[in-house]
Image (cartoon, rainbow, N blue to C red):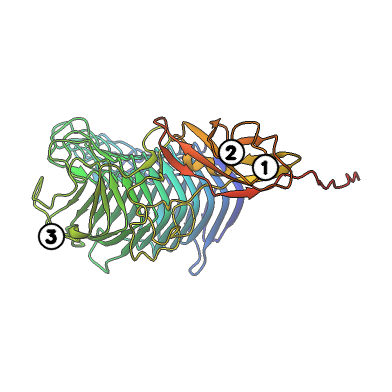
Amino acid sequence: MMVVGARVTLRDMIFKNNQVFGANTTSGAGGAGTGSGLAINWSQPGTSNLLERVTFEGNQSYGGMGPDRGGLAYGALFVNGSVTIDYGTFTNNQALAASSSGSGTSGVLNADALGGAIGGGGGSWVLRHIIATGNQAVGGNGTTFAGGGFGGAIHVETANSFSMTDSYLSANLAQGGNAQDGGFGAGGGILVNSTPATLSRVQLVSNSAIGGNASNGNAGAGGGGGLYLWMTWSGPNPTTSVTNAVITDNYVALGSTGSTAAGGGGGGIQVQGLQATITHSTIARNRLGPGLVSGQGLLVLVDVNAGPGVVNVNYSIIANHTEGASGVVAVLVQSGNTLTFNRVLFAGNTKDTNASGGPVPPGTINGLSTMLSASSAGFISPGSPNYNYHLRLDSAVKDQATSSTTADDIDGQSRPYNGVSDLGADEYWPFPLFAVSGDGTLRLDWTAGASVLAGGVNHYEIIVTCAAGANPPNQGSCGQPINAGTATTFALTGLSNFKQYTIVVNARDSSDVLIASSIIVTASPTDILLYLPLVVK
């Protein structure tokens, strides 16, 4: 579908297995492949497009062949203008820039791929409830200059604003092309370029930004495995806010052949040439490939056109960054840039920052005296296959976010639970428990809260406190743990009607350590039951 000069509202639509091909040319550059599912090329000024409950699956955008360089490619959805997307699912879409036997450049452009799922710019962008998995942006090859892969799932450039909330992006890839020098792979999940941005309650998990291969030069750089925030021109410096984000298990690597001189970093986040504030976020287990040392979790650096990066990190967790070359650090601030910490936990990193001077001289790093340290952040089940970064009951970050004013967490639960908020994206809450009364029975159900504990529970135990004169349950004694295994429902039988029972369910791990508890419920069995008549029409 193509939209030109119109405003569209699209609801309950699927764009699947479509292809678009840029034109092959006999001179210059190949044509651009733009929006294999939907291309909104432009809309009337002052209007905005609306997409609700849309799915883009398996669409492919191909740049066209050209003698100088291959054509650009934008993903399954291309937008030039304002757009709101609410409940969008983007799966296995590709933006594949074309290769060329020529130099690989024409004018100021290389054969770039821009947003495997969504690409474009201009206007105001509002994205809510987005799921993007398995999308790819792959730059084209050339003899001298390779194209870049920018934004494995999403690439937005020079928009008036970009907002994303309540979204999950995983297993997306930004891959540079191959040439004498490899192309840049940037923003495995999201790349926001020269645009004010707000991200809240967003998960960027296991995305990758990988440089292209070099035939006789530098391997392509990689940057921003999960998120790349970039200002690339001289002008008003956009500000970016990232709140309640989970940015974990992302990966950055150089191309597999060529010199390592191009470098790269920012396994989780790269901030270049702009101002960013990161609050109540969990940055964990991000990785750098061989030869890279610059910020497994976070890299802050200058853009030669826009100037320095200025970053504030508040009430967050930076944990479990251990892979990379000798001297690798979790947070690296290059000279000329500024990072200010405010009550952030470091846990389980090989080295926390480059404040001591290695692997490169640091910029200005403020707030180190406010930092907390622990051997473990206390996540439920980090890493594959669960990627569960909710907090355990015994987490060191509980009640540590003194003076935080953030009102909710990654799940939309209110902060604080217990007087003082927790660090990171998650606020620990007891999981819900429901009890339904029957004749001598109480049927318990805590299924609704079990997903928060995925991968961490070895077994549940039920503790029943009985009122005076009340029969104990047939399943065990009053006040003693009753093993419920891994079930999330359980029936207590043999109880005394009209007597009060107070019940709590505890979740324990494989070492029998308590990791979470339910709310406490008080209920009474009864044999007074109300049956409603069945009415058949």
Helix, strand or loop at label 3? It is loop
Report the mark closest to the observer, 1 or 3: 1
Q: Mark 1 touching mark 2, by CB under 8 A?
A: yes
Quickly name the residue at label 3: 336
Look at label 2 and name its amino acid: Cys
Q: Is residue 368 left or right of residue 421?
A: left
Helix, strand or loop at label 1? It is loop
Quickly name the residue at label 1: 470
Q: Position of residue 343 (x, y in %)?
A: 27, 58
CA separation in Å, label 1 and label 2: 9 Å
Q: Is residue 403 left or right of residue 257?
A: right
Look at label 3 and name its amino acid: Gly
Q: Residue sitting at 59 percent across and 38 percent down?
A: 478
Q: Mark 3 touching mark 2, by CB under 8 A?
A: no
Q: Quadrant of residue 312?
A: bottom left
* Residue 271 seen by the camera: yes
